[in-house]
Image (tube, coloured by chain):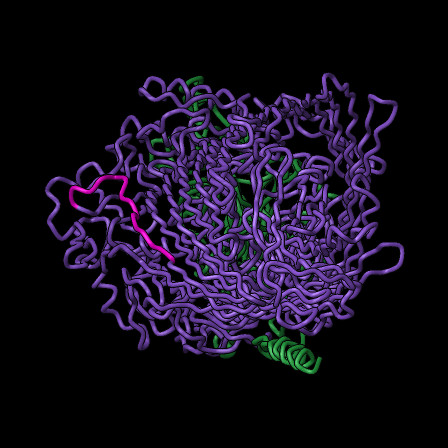
Chain colours: A purple, B green
Amino acid sequence: MSLGAWAQGVTTASLSGMVTESKGETKVGPDAASTATGGPMPGANIVATHLPSGTTYGTISLADGRYFIPGMRIGGPYTIKVSFVGYKEQVQENITLELGQTLVLDFKLVDDATQLQEVTVSAVKDPVLNSDKMGASTNFNVNQIQRLPSIGRDFRDFTSLTPQAGGSAFSFGGRSNLYNNLTIDGATVNNVFGLNPLPAGQSNATPFSLDAIQEVSVSLSPYDVRQGNFTGAGISAVTRSGNNDLQGSAYYFFRNESFAGSKINGQPSPIPSFNYSNFGFRLGGPIIKNKLFFFVNAEFEKRTDPFYTNTVRPNKSTPIGSLYTQATDDNDAETGIAGLKTFLTNLGYDPGVYRNFNRATESQRYVMRFDYNINQNNKLTLRGNITNAFQDQFPSSSGGFVGGPPGGRGNSSNVLSFSSSFYRINNNQSSITAELNTTINGGKMSNNLVIGYSSFRDYRENAGGLAIPSFPLVDILGPNGQTLTTFGPDPFTPNNKLDQTVTQINDNFNIYLKNHQVTIGTANELYSFNNVFTQIINGVYRYNSLADFYADATTATTAAARPSQYTTQYVAVQGGPAATAAKWSAATLGGFVQDEYTGIKNLKIIGGIRMDVPIYLTDLPKNNYLNAIDLNGEKLRVGAWPTIRPLFSPRIGFNWDVKGDRSLQVRGGTGILTGRVPFVWLSNAVSNNGLFFGQFNSTNVPFDLTGDKLPYNFSTTPYALPSDAPASAYADLGKGMPPMITNTLDRNYGRPSIVPAVNTIAKDFKFPQVWRSSLAVDKQLPYGIVGTLEFIYTKDINAVFLRDANLAPSTATLNGDGRPLYGAIPGNANLDRAILSNDRRINGDIGQALVLDNTNKGYQWSITAQLSKTFSRDFSVSAAYTYTDSREVNPQNGSTAGGIFSSQASLLGANNPGLSYANTLTPHRVIAYGTYRKEYAKNFATTVGLTYEGRSGNNFSYIYSGDPNSDGQTADLIYIPKNASEIALTTSSATDTRTIAQIWQQLDNYIKQDDYLNSHRGQYAQRSGAISPWVNRLSISLLQDFYMDVKGRRHTIQISANLINVLNLFDSGSGLVQNPIRASLLRFVGYEQPHTAGIVTAPVATSGPTSTIGLPWAATTGRPVYAFDLNGSSPLTSSYVPDTSVNGRWQLQLGVRYIF
Amino acid sequence: MKNLNCIYVVITALLFAATGCDDNQSATPVPATGPSALSANFIFANAMVTSSASLQLDLLINEVKAGNAVEIGQGQTGGYINVPITSNGTFANTTIQAIGDVSPIGGVLGSGKLYYRSANNGSNGLTATNGFYYTVIAVDSVSRPAPARKLNAGNFGDTTFFNIATGQYISTVDRKALTASQKQQLVAIGTVPLGSTDPGGIRFLVFQDNQPTFANGNTTQSAIRFVNAVPNSYALVSSGSNYPSYPAADRKLYAKLVPSAGSSVTLSSGSTYALAFSAGLNPSVGSRTATGSTFSMQTTVPGGVATTYDLVVDTNASYTNPVTLLLAQTFEANKIYTVVVSGVIGATDSRALKAGIIQHN
């Protein structure tokens, strides 16, 4: 375990130190004036040789005796030689350098005349107790990567061993995983668009092979201003290099369902069959000895799972069992669907199959690297990598602009969807990096130049890699009102692709002066995006029965023959392609200057300032119609970028060797980090501008049965504006005018087409910035144990905040609760454009007007206690405990701005979510790991690796199902009642036989057994305030080597077993992850009195033969009434249920490897 | 060393200056302070059809027993029972259930309880309004089968039928297989709705009685409402190709009160217990509900102890084959009644036509 790391943008290591003359001796050097007894020795020659590759690095000690060798290959062993005429040469062997490390090696030279004088080398090699260490960081080298357990061969298995890491979501320090930055060999390979934190993440693939990696580091609080572009953590991986020896390995790993737990809590719980395999090889060696080296790695990973694991019975007489678990179909489902397939085939469309098809997950990864020692002063590295990955996916259950079909489209007990509606997500990524390290003027200066280019190509196909037909999606409901089947391509798949390129040029120039190392540099990234997304472009039909579909598809001219719902989006740019793209470019230009000062004894200080300037390179079309609307004094900025302004990141860090002997070290610093915003949130504003498309759906437009064949009758051709449509039906991008309604599908002629939501960016929006500070104490404890206590505090300066500019302020207070209440009329621009007095919208032409804005609210802090001990090169252990707190206003981890806005739980309303716990918070976490290797009996070696993670479960929000505060978002935090008087309860359904008193008793019992709820009675629940039970996860890896040394080369056959979640193997009730059964604890049923939000409604009169009774309610706002639903047929009595997926159980992976 | 300490102090100060916490924004909880003060009023009649002559039903509103057990063919006489409810006409959460007073109801359900549902495929109860009055009548046969919705993949629709000859409900029919005479015996009683969860058995008629109080002390008149709860009295369905009307004509039930002296009073000039697709008080197929929004006290009769009436019903307007269901019934002045006719036309066993009276005030 090593902790002395830089990370981001750093690919090499450095060597530094002081050369002094031996005390008590006198020698006149070339510069007599500078060579006092025991003093610094300038002009000494230092040569470091990386033995495996013969690469040499050289420098000469400066006037103060200091020397510095930057840009060195990580790994080793190195031999360091220090010489000076007239002095004995000093040699230090077996030096290993880790990523980003600046190893301090001090030398004392003695003159030739001094006989028998013991040569002493004071090499400070401890990775923690090192003057280089200031902020929090962790490193994992190639040995740990090989020896610690990992079942997915995923580098995140190691980065998660960072004490400050979160539970499982690749988050660090309680911040969103979208705020990390990942680099390989210094080049950004982060998924900067942010649909997933990692490239290939949507395909569930890792971006690079573990066998290609020399070292991975995680940096949380760097005070080196060279590091940027993250406010979470910088994760840096460096690939392996070739050496003078030809070395390689070939490997194969596999697992399947029989290598996993089949019980949960002692009860049989079989998992569906699957097959996983991973094979590959690596090879590295010389092209020209000591000069030019190569390394290649190729890896092929494949997994096959059944799509359907819980399937519809073919007919009513089929017994329910392990194969068929569906119980609600009461008809001959399969016959009907088989008939549908015949019907569609006759129609000329092949819907695919509806049973027994598999989900493919595959990835291929290639790395090639060349290291070229041009000369002693210039080292060039070229690296290219390719990752191609895909995964088949269930069709989305979303409806797009309207609700999705009841029962969804994917894997449920009702649905038998055709394979043509499943899709494949492809994530192809490639990058190439060139790095040149140059030493100038005998080591007095150095330069590091990195040029990188990364390309990401994400696109969709139909499942199985088939072409996407131009055909609508059709949902057909079954007798029970749930989806029976779906065919046609997934509504979000046609024309769905994302091309990203990231080009980067970084240069650092270092000057080594007396007591100063000055760095001047620049860091620039150019981003280019081409995002095509045309949801619902082929139309989505919904029918209540097969017969309805048949009738519509064959006799669409009758009024009765029509779908129960039809939704479509159509291209509104005249002559525009269906695949209208959000094509845009941006860049961040950065520069920095920094000084590392060592002029005070035992203290090292680093101080610098970095400037990043995000700029936007593409002019966007404006929507002048919407931008003219006044929203309570605010004008929208559809199509406008924020003002360009520089963002400054000053930082200062220190390392204080308190006693001068590295037995006690105090380190830390403070400074600002500037990161990227996930660009998809910006891209939402590029594409959701209300210009490119028109939409309509048949559920909220009047049917005009007098017209021609109506566009909502079934047609295999996607809807397009008719050829005789007037010009106003199209968008006028030049004038910024959206398409106007001209046809009979909408009541509001001359108004813009339906705009459910537009996205905009605030004028003064700034990229995320945090002020992060840390303070740590490292101490050498007895028995060679190193203890660390580290405190990190992060304050948001510019966090991302989303608000709906079209949401009217609250109009009242919710009676019986106390929270603000919004207008009763929903913001549905489709329905009615008139604004009523109790409308929750401000303007009726649009639904939601999201603004990407900033807030300075939000903070994180953590404290870590860590103990580590290295017994030998082959035996080390480490254990840490971390307490973390993290607060934020908006959750910062959604794949779209709208998704973040709609999913955040709030009390005061969607525009005022308030500061609460981050949903990426893991408050308590214990991490321990160790490796031990023993070689024995000449030909055998056994290696054991262990990891233990104990942590708080995932946090969540107790919310209402429904929208009692009427803000349009269904994530309202609950009030936790103290007693029955504080909540108006009702039965769940017409068949609920519980009395109100019984329902309260059940709710009260639930609250009593839930620690969070019981301790917060009388309060509103906090967002992400409840925490799932503690998780224990112990994993072990066992490597058995059989080796033979033949002609000086070792050949090894290695059998490996990785056992994840050992505790679950011995007890199927242990090692489980517990998830909340029902976070939406209470279901909002309605208001006790009509919700009028302060608006007086005239009493409804009814008439009878003799008199009239006016309705008795006054113009008041009713108390909300809630149902505490049963859990199936019995009361909900506990909060959590174990995760029964394979990831929650023990799993074993076997492997075999040949190494030479 | 002094400068070291200075640096340390400055950095530490910076660290902790940064720890000033943001306040969470919140509202002060103002929770409810007590149960709902809302209530509504219910009265009940048992008009179900069963061969078990002595089955008594209890009415439960929100699990609270409302009034006394009621015999088949009878109505409650003690007036409305006031029951707490939790919503004032805003959502359908008032549960209505019937339970056998001493034994399960039996029939196709065989269960102890029957539930009112306001929609065919939902689980909603009654949308009750504070202070309102409701009449609940249990109707239909305990043996009514659960209607089944077909996939419609073949050649028949989702139509449920009632066989007027046998008095039986038929869940699904293959129309192509029917003979002409068979068709003449079948009444199409509606399409089984999407997602229907009707389990069969008896259903409920629920009337919203908007004024069960006679205007200011009428000392001479009684008000009487007539409810035809006879399931084989029917109205034809004629709309849509999926709803074929095989029998030739409606079968209506005519009812009148024949006083001991003077002219008779017509309660109904032809009432059909329409099973589907007609307005009014109909339990549509697939649900066990009907909510009448009107309390049409169509008939007022001279009331008072001095006048008694016989109830006569027939299936033709001329009363050529009258059946007398009640004899010498007294209707008090300033009182409101509902007369419910139940049973099966043509039956001579315990399912024979009978009449019950609900006294509303």
Is residue B133 visible in the rendered structure shown here? no
Is residue A384 visible in the rendered structure shown here? yes
**Viewer-closest of A1114 and B316:** A1114
Residue A224: image quadrant is bottom right
Residue A61 lies in magenta, yes or no?
Answer: no
**Viewer-closest of A355 and A77:** A77
- B109 sits left or right of A440 in the view: right
Q: Residue at x 62, y 49 (%)?
A: A46
Where is residue A1091 shown, x and y percent of the image? 48, 70
Quadrant for the C terminus of chain A in the image: top right
Q: Is residue B170 above or below residue A836?
A: above
Q: Is residue B145 above or below residue A919?
A: above
**Viewer-closest of A507 and A1111:** A507
Where is residue A250 shown, x and y percent of the image? 63, 22
- A24 sits left or right of B301 in the view: right
Residue A36: image quadrant is bottom right
How many marks can you see?
Answer: 0
Residue A582 lies in magenta, yes or no?
Answer: yes
Where is residue B141 shown, x and y percent of the image? 60, 39
Q: Is residue A899 above or below residue A319?
A: below
- A623 sits left or right of B27 in the view: left
Q: Which residues are magenta?
A: A574-588
**Viewer-closest of A86 and A1029:** A86
Q: Residue at x 63, y 80 (%)?
A: B10
